[in-house]
Amino acid sequence: MTTRTEHILVLTRDGAHTDERTIAIEAAVAIEVNGIGYAVLMATPAALDDLTTGFLLTERLIDSPADILDLDAFETPAGWIVRATVAERCAGRIHDRVRHRTSDTACGLCGVSGLEQVVRPVARHAPTPHTSAAAVFAALEAIRAHQPLTAATGALHAAALCDAAGAIVAAREDVGRHNALDKLIGACAPARITEGFLLVTSRISFEMVDKALVAGAPMLVGISAPTALAVDHARAHGLSLVALARKDAMLVLNDPHHVFAARL
C-alpha cells in the first residue's frame, strides 16, 4: 500500500468544508548490507529493490547492479527491512563507511542503523496552540519577505517561527528542509517556539513532525502535502497539523484542541 484516504477539514478565507484526500504512505526502510545495519531511509514502500540498488550505487558501496548477489525485502511492525548481499570485493567498503556514518546525518534518518532507532521517545504532548486560521493566512502572506536566498536562487526551503497573530518572529533557509527547521529550532529558545507555530515551505514528513515535537511547538504548518506516517505521529502526540497551506486555502489534518472547529 502506497497511499491512504483521509477525511479532512478544508479552510478557506470564506468558510470551511469537509472533504477526502489521498495521502502518501511513508515508512521506515532499514537497509542491511552483508548482515550490517547500514541506514534507515524514510520512503514510499514500493520498488524497494530499485531504491536499495540506487542507494548502494550512490553510496559507492557497489560499482554496478551485478555486485548485488541477493536482495530480500520484507515488512515488520516497525517498517520494512531490505537485506542485500553484495560481492565479497565490495564488503570492505561497508565496514569503512559504517565507521564514519555517525557524522553523516544531513539527509534525515540516513545515519540511523536500525528500525528500533526511528521512533524515539517524545518527552511531552504538544501544547495547545493559541492562534487562528487568519493568523496562518497572514504568515503565508509574509513568508516570502523572509526568504532572500530563495528569491535569489529558487533552490532553498525555509522554516519560520510565527507568533499567535501570524507575524514571523524568525526564519531560516537551507537547501535541505530538515536543515532549515534545525537551524530555526537552534536559533530560537524553546519558550519562544511553544508560544507560536512553525511554518515550513516543504512537504511534511515524519522527521519534520518529530522535530516540531522535540522543539515543543503547538502546531506545524506546511505548504505541501503530509505523509501518512507524519499524520499518525502528529496525532499520537497532540500536534496540530496543517498542510497544503496556501494564501486562499489549507487542509487541517489534526486539530486536537479544536482551534479551527468554529470555522464549520
Image (cartoon, rainbow, N blue to C red):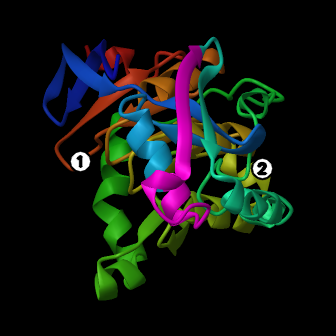
Q: In the image shown, does 254 or 257 lie closer to the viewer?
A: 254
- Residue depicted at x 66% and y 21%: 237
Q: Please report whichever mark, 1 or 2, sits nearer to the chain's N-terminal start.
A: 2
Can residue 167 be found in the magenta stretch? no
Tell me which corner region of the image, top left, top right, bottom left or bottom right, holds residue 204.
top left
Picture coordinates of residue 108, whole percent (x, y): 61, 52
Q: CA distance from mark 1 to mark 2?
A: 27 Å
Q: Is residue 235 visible?
A: no
Type of the residue with mark 2: Ala
Can you name the residue that lies furthest to the bottom here? Answer: 152
Say left or right for 47 vs 230.
left
Q: Which mark is residue 246?
A: 1
Q: Which mark is residue 191?
A: 2
Picture coordinates of residue 192, whole percent (x, y): 71, 53
Q: Secondary structure at mark 1?
A: loop
Q: Which of the image's four quarters has the N terminus?
A: top left
Q: In the image shown, does 132 or 173 lie closer to the viewer?
A: 173
Type of the residue with mark 1: Arg
Label total for image: 2
Tell me which corner region of the image, top left, top right, bottom left or bottom right, holds residue 105.
bottom right
- Residue depicted at x 32% and y 38%: 225
The stretch in magenta equals 55-75
Q: Nearer the viewer, mark 1 or mark 2?
A: 1
- Residue depicted at x 53% and y 19%: 232
Can residue 65 be found in the magenta stretch? yes
